[in-house]
Amino acid sequence: MIDLYTSTTPNGWKASITLEELALPYTTHYIRLGEGDQKKTKYLEINPNGRIPTIVDRDEDNFTVFESGAIMIYLAEKSGRLLPTSKKARSEVIQWLMFQMGGVGPMQGQANVFYRYFPDKIPAVIARYQNETKRLYTVLDTRLRNHEYLVDDYSIADIAHWAWVRLHYWAGVQVDDLPNLQRWMDVMAGKPACQKGIVVPEPFEPEIALSDAKKIVR
């Protein structure tokens, strides 16, 4: 059994979708970011960085994993699915996972902050992060021109990106001119595990998300 500590965010969905796709039993613990649960002593004992998600694998002597990408790799390796075993294919999946971790996530996250949450609207800063997010989306679109998924077979790299890209509108970034990305997004959205994972711990509610995020930004 896995204990999943999470909230209603793209990084949280990366873990919950992966758990759903792998059909691993798990218990959800809702970390309410707007109330500061992530900074409370009890949570910091399992995740010293005070972020979500975190998992605790009860079947492995309560082994703890934090950082969403690390969680996805751990769960894929535990199950023997969503991550190839051949050296080159495995490397490709991890490369695209790192592309999300180091590029799409941080850039779209900052676009979210300055477009939606930051009290002072700074047009140049908003444009900087929206433009970079769009550039990264364009890289994905180019890759998907000749690939059904990012690396041949469906993998954790696809889950990681979809959890973020599905909320492109929240960052004020349009994808109408990226047909390959749109095609892939539709395929991902139709997967039962994706549909289940994005309502953990609860469905995304824009007004609640906006209120919670503003508390954190302040």
Image (cartoon, rainbow, N blue to C red):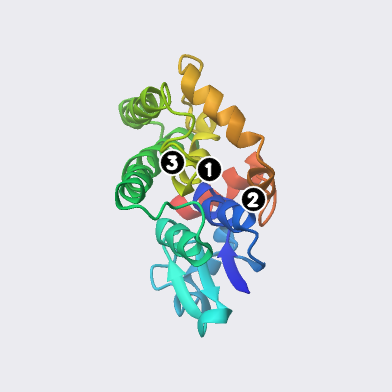
Structural distance between the alpha carbons of marks 1 and 2: 9 Å
Name the quadrant of the N terminus.
bottom right
Q: What type is the residue that disc 3 sits on?
A: Val
- Asked if marks 1 and 2 touch (Cβ < 8 Å), the reply is yes
Structural distance between the alpha carbons of marks 3 and 1: 17 Å
**Which mark is drawn over residue 136?**
none
Q: Position of residue 116 (x, y in %)?
A: 50, 36
Q: What type is the residue that disc 1 sits on?
A: Ala
Label 1 sits on a secondary structure element that is helix
Does residue 110 lie above or below 72 as drawn? Answer: above
Residue ID for mark 1: 163
Crowd band around label 1 with a 10 angstrom C-alpha radius: few (<14), some (14–19), many (20+): many
Residue ID for mark 2: 197
Label 3 sits on a secondary structure element that is helix
**Residue 17 is at least partly visible in this image:** yes
Q: What type is the residue that disc 2 sits on?
A: Gly
- Who comes first in sequence, dot 1 or dot 2? 1
Structural distance between the alpha carbons of marks 3 and 2: 23 Å
Q: Position of residue 122 (x, y in %)?
A: 35, 30
Q: Residue at x 43, y 59 (%)?
A: 73
**Which mark is drawn over residue 113?**
3
Name the side, left or right, on which 59 lies relative to 152: right
- Who comes first in sequence, dot 3 or dot 2? 3
Q: Residue at x 52, y 39 (%)?
A: 162
Label 2 sits on a secondary structure element that is helix
Does residue 15 lie above or below 163 as drawn? Answer: below
- Who comes first in sequence, dot 3 or dot 1? 3
